[in-house]
Amino acid sequence: MKQRELEPGLLSIFNLYVYVRLGLLLFTALMYLLIYGFSLRIDLIPIIILFLVDLAFLLVFLSWSWFRRRLGQWHLPAALIVASVVPIVESRYLYDVYGANAASGLLVVIPFLAVPLILTAWQYELEQVIWFCLGTATFEIALVVIYGTMGATRPAAEIEVILVRTVLFILIGYIVHNLVSAQRRQRAELADANRKLAEFAAALEQLSITRERSRLARELHDTLAHTLSGLAVQLEAVSALWEADPPRARALLGRAAESTRSGLTETRRALQALRASPLEDLGLARALREMAESAAQRAGLALDLGIQPDLPQQPAEVEQALYRVAQEALENAVSHAHARRLRVALRQAPETLTLEIADDGDGLPVERLERERGFGLQGMRERAALVGAELAVESAPDRGTTVRLQVAIASPAAVSQERA
């Protein structure tokens, strides 16, 4: 059989089939006890033992990973062979005990062979499906010829029933194989599209980074580099004239100080342009409100907003940290939490400013939350540490996640001095 990675969910379905067979055995045993009591027929003991050994083997063989590691690509075929051959032997033995006819044999054995047939068509190519159908038919015909079971029924009639069933199985296998092949092609096309999209996004990100670096290099060249270059020339001139012409040296020193202040202003302007533009255009409260409304609308979440409109202005780095932490927390809630409701609050206490973002989604265990690297927690912690804020993340399975950032309110004088 052609080696291929196991289809998703195939082993789970196989295990479910074995448990269903076990349930049917228990149900049959219960009905037998209700009808016949404990008077067990001696000729039923071998088939009961075979049934139990068959189910026990399949349960252990499918569940124990050691068998999968040892057998590799032959693990599933071995399980399919056992799951197909043993029901044929069991059904033939029961036909002999109860004297069933060929037509009833066709109906009884079909459910027990149909599931292995579907699993074979699900995992392998059409050629292997045909081999499965012909192999099970050949094995059963051999039993008919060698042992002459089913009592009064003629072997020719039994073989005819088996051949009819084989044709039916090939048709079923063909249909299932085509459906699975179409699904497999769609998965491959989707994976290829995702790969191309990821490559395009990476290329676009790299292009954006390159453009931003070029822009930043131009800004630094036009501001800081020019200022420092001119300042170096002026200071060298001051040094040369300091003793020979003190008045001229002092004049040059004054122009150097003026150039320094002008360059500092231009550098601050360039740095200001690198900050989050919504904060500059809208202010912290309104920028958070619009970002929360956009995230909730995009994910179809019910939004509970509690953002105070008259919050005191904070230093730019503090507002930047609050905005970026909120952005990361909202993205987590929209993309990963499977939430229905979202709460965003920014409130002022006498000495602190508290940002709180909560959802009612899946949540995570605390120990896993500490190890998680895919939810931007490390970035949030670093932003909080840069501005001396306290970050707390509370989460539990099926109880949602709450991100809380608390920062001390800066004095108006400090804010004015920082923004000057």
Image (cartoon, rainbow, N blue to C red):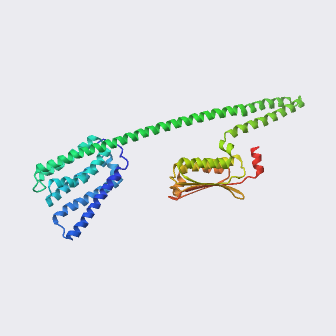
Image coords of residue 382 (percent x, y)? 62, 49
Q: Quadrant of the N terminus?
A: top left
Viewer-proximal residue among 259 and 407: 407
Image coords of residue 111 (percent x, y)? 25, 53
Viewer-proximal residue among 258 and 64: 258
Residue 23: quarter of image: bottom left
Can residue 373 be seen at all in this image of the molecule? no
Image coords of residue 221 (percent x, y)? 70, 31
Residue 311, above or below 127: below
Residue 420: quarter of image: top right
Residue 130, above or below 357: above
Residue 404, above or below 134: below
Question: How many numbered marks does the figure carry?
Answer: 0
Locate residue 271 relative to residue 60 in the image: left or right.
right
Locate residue 117 relative to residue 367 in the image: left or right.
left
Can residue 273 be seen at all in this image of the molecule? yes
Residue at 18% x, 47% y: name it.
164
Residue at 75% x, 44% y: name it.
419
Image coords of residue 95 (percent x, y)? 16, 57
Viewer-proximal residue among 401 and 257: 401
Locate residue 262 relative to residue 145 in the image: left or right.
right
Residue 38, above or below 223: below
